[in-house]
Image (cartoon, rainbow, N blue to C red):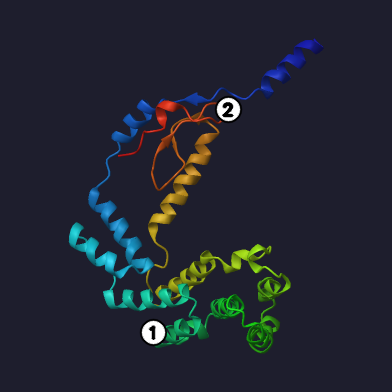
Amino acid sequence: MAAGIQQDISMSNESPTKKSQSIEEWEHRLDNVKVNKQDLNRLVMNYLVIEGYKDAAEQFSLESGVSPSLDLESIQERMEIRHAIQSGDIDTAIGLVNDVNPEILDTDPQLFFHLQQQRLIEMIRVGDYAGALEFATEEMAPRGIEHPEFLEELERTMALFAFPDMHKSPVAELLHASQRQKTAGELNAAILLSQSREKNPRLPELLRLLTWSQEQLDDRMTYPRIEDFCSAKLVVRDGDGNIVDDAIDSTIS
């Protein structure tokens, strides 16, 4: 009897066999999904407009026949602000934002702190340590006292001083281009929100949804999945995680 109970427990602990779908079957399923081309064009235009790619939006409008949902002049303003931040010119960016709407920074202390943090990073980047220390002490520390939630980020930024080679420090990511892009993206979203506009493009949200969907499906079956969204190649892996050869060159058309 004990042996029978042990066998039942063993059987209940076994993982169910995953279903498997070949790349041919998967591509056949994809071919049966009909997507309106104009919907795709609007999705691309939505991304270009919200991210502030004015020239690309104009060209894409000519090629696709889809009109931008925003006035192109407002895109130009946001593009100039983004360019200033990505060039490390935070003073110019703040001036341009105030020209658009001075209330944006007045009513969003976190955004203003992140712009000041980026200014501090840029001062450290060019070696203006005395100016950076004075700026952190006189401008940023009082804001940290007023808003304690900012103190950790300020401390991380000031940690750049502690390492002879900042680019090899634990906080070196603050010097990466992605940090500027993060700050520019936050400011861009705030400007759009102040104009009662959609602040996040839909395309990245759809990609995140696709990633989540694949993760859910991974537990249930083996199937051709997209691992590189730039190439959109369908990849099938065996039980050991190796790519199956016949799936390497398959791409969603």
Residue 69 visible somewhere in the drawing: no
> The N terminus lies in which quarter of the figure?
top right
Q: Is mark 1 on a helix, strand or loop?
A: helix
Q: Where is residue 122 in the image (x, y as percent from the top left)?
A: 56, 77
> The C terminus lies in which quarter of the figure?
top left
Quarter of the image holding residue 163?
bottom right
Q: What residue type is labelled 1?
A: Val
Residue at figure coordinates x 54%, y 78% from the top left:
115
Q: In this view, does 166 lie to the left or right of 213?
A: right
Residue 27 visible somewhere in the drawing: yes
Q: Which mark is residue 240?
A: 2
Give the distance between the C-alpha atoms of the residues marked 2 and 1, in whole angstroms: 55 Å
Q: Nearer the viewer, residue 116 or 246?
A: 246
Characterize the local packing of mark 1: few (<14), some (14-19) or many (20 or more) Cα atoms within 10 angstroms: some
Which tag, 2 or 1, sits closer to the chain's start? 1
Q: Where is residue 88 in the image (x, y as percent from the top left)?
A: 50, 76
Quarter of the image holding residue 176?
bottom right
Q: Which amino acid does label 2 sit on?
A: Asp
Q: In this view, does 250 lie to the left or right of 93?
A: left
2 and 1 marks in contact (CB < 8 Å): no
Characterize the local packing of mark 2: few (<14), some (14-19) or many (20 or more) Cα atoms within 10 angstroms: few
* In this rendering, the label closer to the viewer, 2 or 1: 2
* Residue, disc 1: 100
Which residue of the protein is positioned furthest toward the right in this rendering? Answer: 2
Residue at figure coordinates x 43%, y 72% from the top left:
188
Q: What element carries label 2?
A: loop
Q: Residue 231 carries which label?
A: none
